[in-house]
Amino acid sequence: MMFADAARSAAHVAAAVLGWRPHEFWAATPAELVTALGLDVPPAEAPVNAGLLAGLMEQFPDGC
């Protein structure tokens, strides 16, 4: 993918998801775009399995 194509795609995402206007997109750093889109959040370590969920429900009942 060429830079122009990648920039066009990123600008579209910034406009659609964040509501950024072109000057806001071009003024942002790549790190700011990643942070604004929430892409800098590390993934969860592991999915919750049935046993862990049952233990959490027992430990933290919600009264239902």
Image: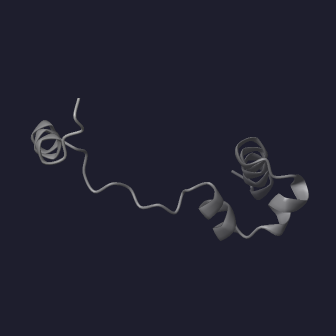
Nearer the observer, 43 or 58: 58
Quarter where residue 63 is shown? top left
Please identify the residue farthest to the right as the structure is shown: 23
Res 13 quadrant in image? top right
Q: Does residue 54 appear to the left or right of 39 in the view shown?
A: left
The residue sitting at 56% across, 56% down in the picture is 38
Give the camera-side residue of 18 and 22: 18
> Which residue is situated farthest in the front direction here?
63
Q: Is residue 10 left or right of residue 56?
A: right
Count of numbered circles on the image? 0
Residue 12: x %, y % from top left:
77, 44
Locate residue 62: give its quadrant.
top left
Q: Is residue 1 above or below residue 29?
A: above
Above or below residue 37? Residue 57 is above
The location of residue 1, given as percent across then percent down, is 68, 50
Residue displayed at 81% across by 52% down: 20
Colour scheme of this structure image? one colour
Question: For this rendering, which residue is in front, 7 or 57?
Answer: 57
Please provide percent x and percent y for residue 7: 77, 54
Q: Is 8 situated left or right of 57 in this image? A: right
Residue at the spot x=12%, y=38% of the render?
A: 54
Image quadrant holding the C terminus, namely: top left
Nearest the camera: 8 or 51? 51
Residue at horizontal 62%, vertical 54%?
37
**In the shown orientation, is residue 47 left or right of residue 16?**
left
